[in-house]
Image: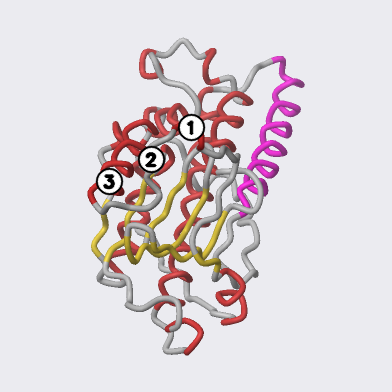
Amino acid sequence: MILLISGGHGILGIVQGLEDYVLLGTALDASPGDVLDKLSRRLKLNRLSDECLKGVAGGKAIEIIAKTYNGDHQRFNLPLPRSQSKDCDFSFTGIHAAAEQLINKLESENRGSGCALSIQDIADVCASVQFCMTRLICRRVQRAIEYCLLNTDSRASVIRNHPTALVVSGGVGSNCVIRAGLTEVANHYNLRFVAPPPSLCTDNGIMIAWNGVLLQKENSSRIIEDISSVDFCPRSTFGVDCREDVKQANISIEPIKLSSDIFQP
């Protein structure tokens, strides 16, 4: 099972071969990385003169601030988007909207006292956003695993074997809190958890080049010798789309209770 979470994607699926994919869930609106980047700008984290943020921006800054200033992930109760939907699709815009409303409320309250948001307020917002996003992602992954374990003809006709590993990649996949949550989900189902070093999660060039190397080794028909014949498109399809079958399976899950330790700085 693979989970790609980045500034441009939110994809949950099964890889059965180098060119054999099954799509189980996708981001319906904004990507997780895009939401984290926008909230980082909204909180003006780039303006904080803090040594811990030197050379850091976007979603990574949210993770660092939450950890450095002991952000309380339970102080603000952000709603979990699409919590009643029994599919594996993500809605990260819901987190963005809820966090924006929270920030506006805090700023309005502080305006009366003539003060800007305190660093503790900011850290608590960052921790709460991180907590909400981790829960959302983990629940979708849990339902995807449960779907793969179903003994139904529709599932078996597309997904040949039960997953043995959970592989996470993409810039958001380097977030230590999200990784820890996904590790607990993987352990619950006895899946091996695999994730590239954080330094490689944000390098698209390496990802694309490595995929090209693997395709070349397999003598894939997708290898194009004439570069001028390459057709460009902003979005490409991802294997066989089984999202509707996942939805029709109507799978209820008992969310895995994530250890509180992973949210502690």
Q: Residue at x 51, y 56 (%)?
A: 238
Label 1 sits on a secondary structure element that is helix
Q: Nearer the viewer, residue 52 or 192?
A: 192
* Residue type at numbered disc 2: Asn
Measure the alpha-carbon separation of dots 2 and 1. Answer: 9 Å
Q: Quadrant of residue 249?
A: bottom right
Image: 72 above or below 182: above
- Local crowd at mark 1 within 10 Å, few (<14), some, or many (≥20)? many
Which label belongs to residue 175? 2
Q: Residue at x 67, y 32 (%)?
A: 103
Q: Are marks 3 and 2 in contact (CB under 8 Å)?
A: no
Q: Nearer the viewer, mark 3 or mark 2?
A: 3
Q: Describe residue 5's horizontal placement relative to residue 207 as left or right.
A: right
Measure the alpha-carbon separation of dots 3 and 2. Answer: 31 Å
Q: Is residue 192 magenta?
A: no
Label 2 sits on a secondary structure element that is loop
Q: Are marks 2 and 1 in contact (CB under 8 Å)?
A: yes
Image: 68 above or below 77: above
* Residue type at numbered disc 3: Gln
Q: Quadrant of residue 258?
A: bottom left
Please name the residue that numbered disc 3 is placed on: 216
Q: Position of residue 143 (x, y in %)?
A: 48, 71
Image: 231 above or below 165: above
- Local crowd at mark 2 within 10 Å, few (<14), some, or many (≥20)? some
Measure the alpha-carbon separation of dots 3 and 1. Answer: 34 Å
